[in-house]
Amino acid sequence: MQYVILEIFISNCRRFRIQATFQGKLLMGKNRLEAFSDGVIAIIITIMVLEMKVPHGDDLAALYSLIPVFISYVLSFVYVGIYWNNHHHLLHAVQRINGPILWANLHLLFWLSLLPFVTGWMGENHFSTWPVAVYGMVLLMAAIAYSILELALVRLQGKDSELAKAVGRDYKEKISLVIYAAAIPLSFVSRWIAFSLYVAVAVMWVVPDRRIEKKLSH
């Protein structure tokens, strides 16, 4: 596993670049940020799939015990895919970044990097109350981190930029935050209701959000 992760990291490091200046100020290009983020997200997915242990039996019954782990993996894989997709579109709409954006991006990657742990914990314990609640906490913090990154990018690009116009008020992000915040305490009432809310948010975001694409195409 270590060699796979190292190879992914090295291949993405080769894509790192720093671009020139902008209006007399030293501003970094986005290539390094994109490459590093892609590498971390690829590692997150790799770790999650490697957490699914091979069963010792040779029949379908041996797979039965892995069903909760597999369901947890599928949900987290979808979430990581959603973040990767939206992160790609977000950075596609910008030309430059700065230090605060680098830290905001690291903040997002920190919470996403916890997904393999909470995914495995929730699956191995068959969706027990505390694992489901902590899973929701990580989703909530990742969503907040993404919002912070989005705000930092909009601030640098300017309120009249295409990115600012495309993002708008972003009601879907706000609705997601409310659902996560409600699902966490609901985990102690009904873990299945909470888990269903996590699935509902994932389904909501699987539907492509083409606001940025539409703005950039004009």
Image (cartoon, rainbow, N blue to C red):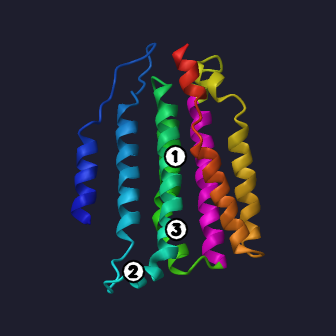
C-alpha span from label 1 to label 2: 33 Å
Q: Write down the residue under mark 1.
A: 83
Q: Residues within 10 Å of mark 2 (few under 14, many from 20)?
A: few
Q: Is residue 151 magenta?
A: yes
Q: How far, Cα to Cα, is label 2 from label 3?
A: 16 Å
Residue at 52%, 33% (x, y): give it.
90
The residue to which callout 3 is attached is 71
First-in-chain label (1 vs 2): 2
Amino acid under disc 3: Ile
Q: In the rendered structure, which segment of residues is drawn in magenta?
A: 129-153
User: Which is more toward the observer, 175 or 21?
Assistant: 175
Residue 186: percent from left, percent from top: 76, 69
**Secondary structure mainly formed by the magenta segment:** helix
Q: Position of residue 130 (x, y in %)?
A: 64, 77
Q: Is residue 107 above or below residue 69?
A: above
Circle nearer the viewer, 2 or 3: 2
Against 79, is 33 above or below?
Answer: above
Q: Quadrant of residue 199?
A: bottom right
Viewer-nearest of labels 1 and 2? 2
Q: Residue at x 54, y 25 (%)?
A: 213
Reply above or below: 80 against 167. Answer: below
Give the secondary structure at mark 2.
helix
Q: Which residue is mark 2?
A: 60
Identify residue type, mark 2: Leu
Q: Residue at x 78, y 75 (%)?
A: 189
